[in-house]
Image: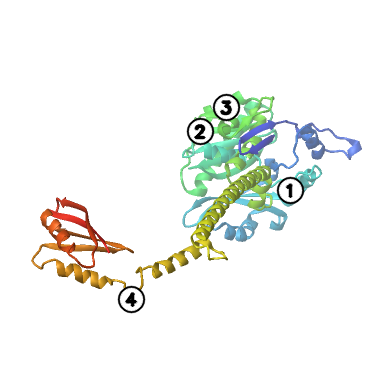
């Protein structure tokens, strides 16, 4: 099964089934069943270059053990696992490949361990390598299916999952969303009734073993089956009558449907496609499974998987960045033109005002400095010998206004030839009186009342007098 995984979604683009047992002996290829030739036939019309292969192996090669360890950290568990497992194996521990899944995280950690002979894994990897296939997940047959069921179907309820093939039956127990145990049985029986009867006995053995191992009752509310569906009606009926538990064959596509869409024209056969669908689903959903392959870097994995999307996104980001920079430079160019125009205007005004200045470097700064000099120079007009001092003007005003008159001067602004005084008094008559008193012969030439208004908030007359010097 070929699943396209992209940002847009996950789609089944191709699928094909070939029975490995149907590959006949071929003297030209050394005889025996050649898995490489079977796989070559399966993928000959599929575009598998650049894919991330996921493989499951038959229950025939896998055995399971339940162990208890005093650690919760997976790294520590992996370090002690060979020593804990060795007494339970019929062959040396260095001849096997193992992986585990944790069940409980109480005082001690219960783990379910999957074990396969390393030589069998090597045979499979060598056969796949001939087709340039390097799987990053090698899962036990049926385990990915039960993981999907435990997460997607009634995760809080207890159930049993049974994976069937022509020779082996694997029974999984699930409690509170965790796969607690797995047991494989050799069962090459073709008669559905005999097979169902033997299966019921094996299921009861598994339940008894569960209750003994974990010291708790196990009462499954459902029983799911997957795999070879030959005689499925008889099998389901016998199980339900014997165990009094509802049983049914599971359609894995219905379980993982929100995660996958089908582009392939061929219909999915649940009895043949469940395992492949489950393998795809655990990868899409990020679910853990027992994995007999070496783990790869997550960064490398996602880079290879989404490389094209990353490149397209990077190119788009670069294009947007170039547009933004072009816009900034474009605006900066026109802003600089405006600044240059203003500088030319300032320089023109400066030269017009001060034609004696020949060298202009910074017209704005030079104009500020020159204006300050001119203000200083023109603080008083005329010759200093004949200049009337401000103190003399203030003294003259003070001497002409009687002390008993209600008037307060608030502002004194002097120019070259005139000055403006502001103040307030209690009546308009006082304004006229002040004007008349200041017009007496002396240093003031002409006096004009610029304004005289009643300020309502203070009930006083605000006035301004312009005095020509």
Left-right relation of 30 to 319: right
| Residue with the mark numbered 1 | 121
Could you tell which of marks 2 and 4 lies nearer the N-terminus? 2
Residue drawn at point x = 47 percent, y = 48 percent:
215
Q: Secondary structure at mark 3?
A: helix
Q: Earlier in the sequence, mark 1 or mark 2?
A: 1
- Mark with earlier residue (1, 4): 1
Question: What residue is pinned by disc 4?
Answer: 385
Residue receiving disc 3: 236
Residue at x 85%, y 35% (from the top left corner): 25
For residue 202, what is the image quadrant?
A: top right
Packing grade of label 2 (10 A; few <14, some 14-19, many >=20) is some
Whether the residues at callouts 4 and 3 have beta carbons within 8 Å, the answer is: no
Q: Residue furthest bottom?
A: 385
The residue positioned 33% from the left and 76% from the top of the image is: 385
Which label sits in the foreground, 3 or 1? Answer: 1
């Amino acid at each position: 099964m070929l699943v396209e995984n992209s940002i847009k979604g996950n789609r089944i683009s191709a699928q094909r089934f070939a029975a490995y047992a149907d590959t006949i002996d071929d003297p030209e290829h050394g005889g025996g069943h050649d898995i490489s030739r079977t796989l070559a036939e399966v993928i000959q019309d599929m575009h598998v270059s650049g894919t991330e292969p996921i493989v499951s192996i038959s229950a025939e090669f896998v055995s399971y053990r339940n162990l208890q360890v005093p650690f919760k950290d997976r790294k520590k568990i992996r370090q002690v696992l060979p020593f804990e497992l060795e007494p339970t194996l019929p062959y040396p521990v260095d001849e096997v490949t193992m992986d585990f899944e944790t069940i409980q995280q109480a005082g001690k950690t219960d783990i379910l361990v999957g074990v396969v002979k390393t030589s069998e894994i090597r045979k499979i990897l060598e056969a796949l390598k001939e087709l340039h296939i390097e799987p990053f997940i090698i899962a036990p047959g049926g385990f990915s299916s039960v993981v999907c069921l435990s997460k997607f179907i009634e995760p809080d309820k207890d159930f049993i999952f049974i994976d069937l093939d022509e020779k082996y039956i694997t029974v999984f127990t699930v409690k509170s969303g965790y796969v607690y145990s797995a047991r494989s049985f050799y069962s090459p029986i073709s008669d559905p009734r005999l097979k169902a009867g033997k299966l019921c006995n094996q299921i009861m053995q598994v339940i008894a073993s569960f209750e003994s191992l974990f010291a708790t009752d196990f009462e499954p509310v459902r029983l799911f089956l997957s795999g070879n569906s030959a005689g499925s009606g008889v099998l389901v009926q016998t199980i339900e009558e014997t165990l009094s538990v509802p049983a049914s064959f599971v359609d894995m596509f219905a379980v993982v449907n929100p995660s996958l869409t089908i582009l392939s024209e061929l219909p999915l056969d649940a009895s043949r496609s469940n395992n492949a669908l489950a393998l795809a689903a655990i990868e899409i959903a990020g679910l853990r499974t027992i994995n007999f392959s070496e783990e790869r870097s997550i960064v490398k994995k996602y880079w290879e998987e989404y490389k094209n999307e990353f490149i397209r996104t990077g190119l788009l980001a670069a294009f947007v960045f170039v547009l933004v920079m072009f816009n900034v430079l474009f605006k900066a160019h026109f802003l600089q033109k405006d600044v240059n125009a203003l500088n030319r205007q300032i320089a023109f005004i400066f030269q017009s005002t001060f034609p004696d200045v020949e060298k202009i470097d910074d017209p704005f700064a030079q104009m500020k400095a020159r204006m300050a000099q001119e203000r200083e120079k023109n603080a008083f007009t005329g010759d200093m010998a004949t200049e009337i001092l401000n103190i003399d003007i203030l003294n003259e005003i003070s001497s002409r206004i009687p002390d008993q008159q209600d008037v307060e001067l608030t502002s004194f602004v002097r120019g070259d030839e005139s000055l403006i005084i502001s103040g307030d008094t209690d009546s308009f008559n006082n304004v006229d009186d002040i004007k008349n008193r200041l017009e007496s012969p002396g240093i003031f030439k002409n006096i004009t009342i610029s304004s005289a208004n009643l300020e309502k908030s203070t009930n006083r007359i605000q006035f301004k007098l312009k005095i020509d010097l």
